[in-house]
Image (cartoon, grey):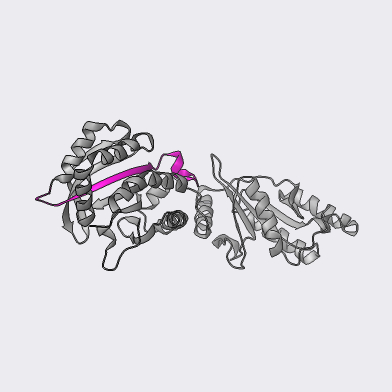
């Protein structure tokens, strides 16, 4: 038995969290105070520890922790746990392992066990590790209640855990888009840290009719983000788009000169994408449609898995042309579709990073020596 002493209930939260995380749950704890999840249906109470596991059947666990077995602590824990059963599929109360196994507490522990078993409330004993003493009885919740739980949980999330298919419908809802925006920000924050190590910095972001962030080399004085070849990650109604964009301008002119000087190198780089990533490669003619908006008036598309020398010759030919109606863009992108497993996983950032890594050779080929 652990003799670990908890000076307050907050010091128990991390042990409980680790136990739930080890069992496949996403967890939010009320630390610092006031950060935890609160529901309108709970009199403004904030749950000490809440855990969610998504799958065929959504599981939501609430834990009310107390660092002693005093009568007021026990009654308060039972009262809150009873209320939590209205909004969570399983509910536990948690006490220090040392208190539960203290000889003088044998009678009160037995009474608590009996009362919890009668109410369907579980008990966790917390020491250096956490252990289930009494199993909580699952309860069924209304769909609207489960939706509110997820909304509240996702508002408090501190790490990206993947998108749900319904998030791509929420994108169009003024009432629910903030939840999705928070998820998207968490994804980008994780990605941004990884890209910094590759010499890429965030250069722009937008949240309007479309959501996106751009990354490139650090901009020189006077450079605008869209004039420099940049990677973007954007949220669409169909999924998450990752792109490399090179717009008409000094850098595209540099690419044209490099292709003329060394077409074989450009060909080799593009052929290398065939076995690295799945992507679309486009030469687009973009025309101004108002404000900062442009649209494609024409485009030539090649899919990386089918690309060959004839496609690359066509791409090089189109790149050398000057548009009379608009501006030429060189674009490589991949859509992580809303139905794809990768999009629903916390590993989505790994897949986006891998995509950008595969494009670093072509990116470096373009930006080397600046716009000279």
Using the rendered image of the protein, determine whether residue 28 is visible from the camera's viewpoint: yes
Tell me where residue 86 appears, x and y as whole percent. 61, 53
Instruction: Answer left or right for 316 relative to 231.
Output: left
Where 225 falls versus 362 (above or below)? Answer: below
In front: 240, or 231?
Answer: 231
Q: What is the total number of numbered labels drawn onto the structure image? A: 0
Tell me where residue 143 appears, x and y as whole percent. 51, 47
Tell me where residue 111 appears, x and y as whole percent. 83, 54
As drawn, which residue projects farthest toward the right?
A: 103
Seen at 25% across and 59% down, the residue is: 227
Task: Say whether residue 324 is magenta.
Answer: yes
Seen at 40% across and 46% down, the residue is: 357
In front: 171, or 191?
Answer: 191
Seen at 80% across and 64% down, the residue is: 71
As drawn, which residue projects farthest toward the front?
A: 261
Tell me where residue 278 appears, x and y as whole percent. 36, 37
Instruction: Answer left or right for 280 relative to 73.
Output: left
As drawn, which residue projects farthest toward the left?
A: 324
Seen at 72% across and 58% down, the residue is: 78
In which image quadrant can residue 320 be found?
A: top left
Task: Say whether residue 22 is magenta.
Answer: no
Q: Which residues are magenta?
A: 322-347
Pick the quarter of the image with the C terminus. Answer: bottom left
In front: 357, or 74?
Answer: 357
Where 239 falls versus 43 (above or below)? Answer: above
Using the rendered image of the protein, determine whether residue 298 is visible from the camera's viewpoint: no
């Amino acid at each position: 038995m652990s003799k670990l002493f908890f000076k307050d209930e907050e010091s128990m939260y991390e042990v409980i969290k680790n136990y739930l995380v080890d069992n496949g749950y996403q967890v939010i704890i009320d630390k610092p105070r006031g950060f935890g999840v609160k529901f309108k249906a709970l009199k403004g109470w904030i749950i000490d520890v809440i855990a969610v596991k998504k799958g065929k059947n959504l599981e939501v666990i609430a834990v009310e922790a107390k660092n002693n077995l005093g009568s007021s602590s026990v009654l308060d824990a039972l009262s809150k746990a009873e209320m939590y059963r209205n909004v969570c599929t399983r509910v536990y109360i948690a006490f220090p392992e040392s208190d539960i196994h203290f000889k003088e507490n044998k009678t009160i522990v037995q009474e608590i066990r009996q009362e919890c078993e009668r109410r369907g409330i579980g008990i966790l004993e917390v020491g250096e590790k956490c252990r289930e003493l009494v199993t909580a009885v699952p309860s069924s919740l209304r769909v609207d209640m489960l939706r509110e739980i997820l909304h509240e949980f996702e508002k408090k999330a501190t790490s990206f855990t993947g998108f749900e298919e319904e998030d791509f419908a929420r994108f169009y809802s003024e009432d629910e888009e903030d939840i999705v925006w928070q998820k998207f920000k968490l994804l980008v924050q994780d990605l941004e840290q990884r890209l910094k190590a590759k010499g890429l910095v965030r250069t722009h972001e937008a949240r309007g009719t479309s959501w996106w962030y751009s990354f490139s080399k650090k901009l020189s004085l006077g450079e605008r983000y869209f004039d420099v070849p940049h990677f973007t990650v954007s949220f669409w109604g169909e999924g998450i788009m990752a792109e490399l964009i090179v717009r008409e301008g000094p850098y595209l002119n540099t690419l044209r000169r490099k292709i003329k000087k060394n077409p074989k190198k450009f060909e080799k780089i593009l052929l290398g994408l065939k076995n690295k990533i799945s992507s679309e490669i486009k030469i687009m003619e973009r025309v101004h449609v108002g404000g900062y908006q442009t649209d494609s008036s024409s485009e030539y598309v090649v899919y990386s898995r089918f690309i060959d020398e004839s496609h690359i010759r066509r791409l090089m030919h189109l790149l050398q042309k000057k548009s009379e109606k608009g501006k030429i863009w060189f674009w490589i992108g991949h859509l992580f579709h809303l139905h794809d497993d990768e999009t629903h996983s916390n590993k989505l950032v790994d897949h986006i990073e891998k995509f950008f890594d595969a494009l670093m050779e072509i990116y470096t080929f373009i930006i080397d020596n600046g716009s000279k």
